[in-house]
Each structure stands twice: as C-alpha cells, then as structure tokens.
Image (cartoon, grey):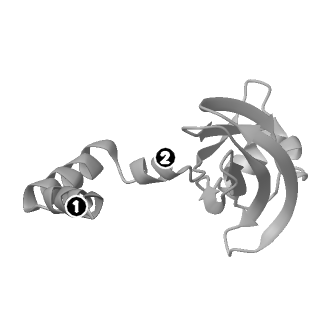
C-alpha cells in the first residue's frame, strides 16, 4: 500500500504548474520532434533543388536529414505546373544523418528533362529500429521554368 502512496506523491510532484511550464519550454527549445526521438518514431526531412551543371545537364540536388537511422521506400516524381505527374520511380534505401547527393534527372525520376515547366518531388515511407512506420512528404523543388529547360537543352 505504501508503494501506491509513493507513486501518487511522485505524480503530484511532477504535475505541478512549474513542471508543465518546464515541459513546454523544453519542447520549444528542442523542437517538436523531441518526443518522436524519445519514443522511437521515424523522421526524415528532404530538400530538393533543380540545377544545371557546367555540362548543361539538369541535375537534382537532394539533401536528406534524419536524427536516427531509418529505412524504407522513396517515391520520386516529376510534376507539371498543373499538378499532373509526368513520371515517377521508386527507390528502397536507408538514411542516417545529413546526406547531400546530386542526381541526373533520369536517375532520380526515371525520365528525361521536360520541355515544359516542372518540379521534382519525393515522398517517403520510412521505418525506424523500433518498428514504427510513418509517411512523409511531398517534399518538392521549386518549378523550373520552361524557358530554362529549353535554354539548357539547346546549349
């Protein structure tokens, strides 16, 4: 019986208004993903840019970031400015930490450069070591204008 009274006293101490303020401040300082990290939720962030290299090829600059190792499925798409998906491809991979890669458009999405405005997007279905799975995305690049595409392909 005394064990229950100790538990009650602990809960009472930890549920004071000061504890609540401390919990909120911790969440603000360390970000909302702190709880995800504590319970083993998978998490991934992605930034995409379409650039032209010195050889006038269309390249996708891909920056992924995770706090813990995750693995899963990534779907890359090329989208027209009206939202239509022009082509797509899937990749099974694992990610950990920050990784910046440069891809030829065909390797990243499975299609050649478009003659109209387009952007590239990624969607993820990732799992962590805890076995939890989450969906993320779409993460999309800014649109590459049709004039930029035709200028780079004519060089």
Residue that mark 2 sits on: 37
Q: Position of residue 6 (x, y in %)?
A: 22, 56
Q: Position of residue 92 (x, y in %)?
A: 85, 47
Foreground of the two, 112 or 29: 29
Q: Label 1 neighbourhood size at 10 Å, few (<14), some (14-19), many (20+)?
A: few
Foreground of the two, 122 or 119: 122
Q: Which of the 4 quarters of the picture holds residue 104?
A: top right
Q: Which of the 4 quarters of the picture holds residue 67?
A: top right
Residue that mark 1 sits on: 11
Q: Residue furthest top?
A: 54
In this picture, residue 37 sits left or right of residue 79: left
Could you tell me which residue is drawn at 70 percent across and 56 percent down? 124
Foreground of the two, 144 or 4: 4
Image height of 155 relative to 26, above or below: above
In this picture, residue 28 sits left or right of residue 114: left
In this picture, residue 67 sits left or right of residue 9: right
Image height of 13 relative to 99, above or below: below
Q: Quadrant of the C terminus?
A: top right
Q: Position of residue 70 (x, y in %)?
A: 68, 43
Q: Position of residue 96 (x, y in %)?
A: 65, 34
Could you tell me which residue is drawn at 60 percent across and 46 percent down? 46
């Amino acid at each position: 019986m005394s064990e229950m009274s100790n538990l009650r006293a602990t809960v009472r101490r930890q549920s004071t208004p000061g504890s609540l303020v401390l919990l909120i401040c911790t969440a603000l300082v360390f970000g909302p993903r702190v709880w995800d990290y504590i319970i083993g939720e998978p998490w991934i962030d992605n930034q995409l840019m379409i650039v032209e290299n010195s050889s006038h090829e269309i390249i996708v600059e891909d920056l992924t970031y995770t706090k813990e190792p995750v693995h899963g499925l990534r779907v890359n798409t090329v989208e027209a400015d009206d939202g239509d998906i022009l082509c797509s491809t899937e990749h099974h991979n694992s990610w950990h930490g920050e990784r910046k890669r440069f891809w030829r458009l065909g390797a990243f999405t499975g299609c050649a450069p478009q003659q109209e405005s387009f952007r590239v997007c990624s969607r993820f279905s990732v799992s962590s070591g805890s076995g939890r799975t989450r969906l993320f995305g779409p993460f999309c690049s800014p649109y590459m204008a049709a004039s930029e595409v035709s200028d780079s392909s004519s060089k």
